[in-house]
Image (cartoon, rainbow, N blue to C red):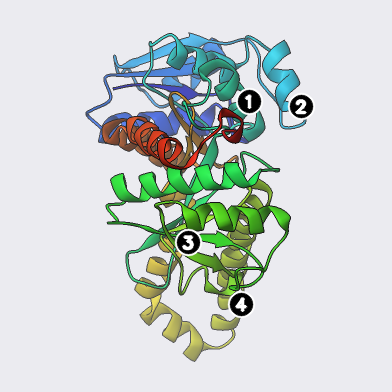
Amino acid sequence: MRIALDAMGGDYTPKNTTEGAVLALKEYADIKKLFLVGDDIAIRNELKQLNCHDPRIEIFHAAEVVNMADSAAKAVRTKRDASINRAIDLVKNGSADAMVSAGHTGAAVAASVLKLRTLKGIGRPAIACLLPTAVKGKVFVLIDAGANPNSTPENLLQFGIMGSVFAEHVLGYKKPSVALMSIGEEDMKGNDITKEAFKLLKNSDLNFRGNIEGHDLFENSADVVVCDGFTGNVMLKTSEAIAHAIFSWLKQELFKTPILKLGARLAKGAFKAIRDKTNYEEYGGMPLLGVNGTCIIAHGGSTPLAIKNAIRAAVESIKHEINPHILLEAQAYNDKFVTSPTQVQ
C-alpha cells in the first residue's frame, strides 16, 4: 500500500503529522510507501527530531499550504503547489493508493472532486463519520458529516447507498438499517428536501427504517444516518463539545471532596473506557465516499495518535475496496429506479 499524507494539513503541522506517520509505519506493515507531502526542510527536521530513517518514507515537496481562511475552490485553482493538491495528484497519477489530510476540509473535497471526479452514478461525495452508540462496541455511520452544506434529495439517497455499503463491507453489518435525520419520526416531518428524500429512500432497496430524531441518535440509532453536510457537521461538532464538557463537569464534581476523589480513582477504568469511546483520536479519519479514489479527512486538531489512526483508516479502506461496491449499488439503483438521465444528479 502507498499512502500520501498531507504533512502541512492541520493545526499542528508538520510536527503532529510527521510523528503520526512514524507511529503508523511502526504499526502497519502493509504500508510499503508513505509520501510526506509538504515543506521538505520542515519535514526533514521533524524526522531528525524523531530519529526516524524508515526507508518507506518519501518526502514530496510542496511549496504552498491551503490556510483555513482560504476559499476552498479558489485555493485549489490558484495554489496548485499546495500540499493538499499535490497529495491528491499522487492518487490521481497512480503513485499513491490513498490520501490523508487533516487540513482544510473544503479544499480536500474540492480538490478530490476536481482531480479524481466522482464515481459513476454519484452526484456528490460525502464524508462518512463513525459515532458511538449506547450498545457496547457498536457504532453508526453519519453521512454526510461536512462535505456538502446543501444537498438535493437525490444526493441524500446516494449518501444512503454509500453509507450502507460502508456499514456492510467495513463494519460488517448485514443488511444495515438506514434512517433519515429529521425533526420528527412521522413521514411528513421535515423540510421539502428531507420529505422528498424520504420518498426516494423508502422506494429504494435500502433497509430504510424512516426518519430519526436527535434524541434517538445514540440510544436507538440506525446503522446509517443520512443528512446534509451542514446538519451533519453541526451534529458532529456538537457531540464532540458535549463529550468534552461532560468530562470537565465530572472532573469538577469528583474532586470536591476526598471521598469523591477516592470514588473517581476506583472508577478510573470506566471513565477511561467512556473517554476512548467518545475520543475522535481513536477513530482517526473519515472517508470521503463517492470520489474515484481513497481520501481520508482527519480532524483539524489531530494529535499524532489521531494521524496514526487516520492512516489506519486509509489502510482499511484500501483493503475493503469500497469503491467497486459503491459503483455496483449505484448502478443497480439506477437500472431499477431511474428512467431518465436527468434524474441522476
Residue most extreme to the front: 339
**Cα distance in 3D space between marks 2 and 1:** 10 Å
Q: Looking at the image, can residue 133 be seen?
A: yes
Task: Please state which of the two labelled residues, at mark 3 or mark 1, is closer to the viewer.
Answer: 1
Instruction: Determine the residue positioned at 23% across, 28% down.
Output: 30
Which of the two residues, 168 or 252, is positioned nearer the viewer here? 168
Among the two numbered marks 2 and 1 on one chain, the one whose residue lies closer to the N terminus: 2
The x, y position of residue 282, in whole percent, is 41, 51
Among the two numbered marks 4 and 2 on one chain, the one whose residue lies closer to the N terminus: 2
Task: Please state which of the two labelled residues, at mark 4 or mark 2, is closer to the viewer.
Answer: 2
Q: Residues within 10 Å of mark 3 (few under 14, many from 20)?
A: some
Q: Mark on residue 252?
A: 4
Hey, what amino acid is under mark 1? Answer: Ala
Asked if the residues shown at circle 4 and circle 1 are in contact, with their CB atoms under 8 angstroms apart, the answer is no
Secondary structure of residue under mark 3: helix
Secondary structure of residue under mark 4: helix
Among the two numbered marks 4 and 3 on one chain, the one whose residue lies closer to the N terminus: 4
Q: Residues within 10 Å of mark 1 (few under 14, many from 20)?
A: many
Which of the two residues, 78 or 245, is positioned nearer the viewer here? 78
Task: Please state which of the two labelled residues, at mark 2 or mark 3, is closer to the viewer.
Answer: 2
Hey, what amino acid is under mark 3? Answer: Thr
The residue that disc 3 covers is 278
The residue that disc 2 covers is 71
Q: Is 182 rendered above or below residue 226?
A: below
**Cα distance in 3D space between marks 4 and 1:** 43 Å
Secondary structure of residue under mark 2: loop
Asked if the residues shown at circle 4 and circle 3 are in contact, with their CB atoms under 8 angstroms apart, the answer is no
The residue that disc 1 covers is 110
Asked if the residues shown at circle 4 and circle 2 are in contact, with their CB atoms under 8 angstroms apart, the answer is no
Q: Is 231 rendered above or below residue 259?
A: above
Q: How many marks?
A: 4
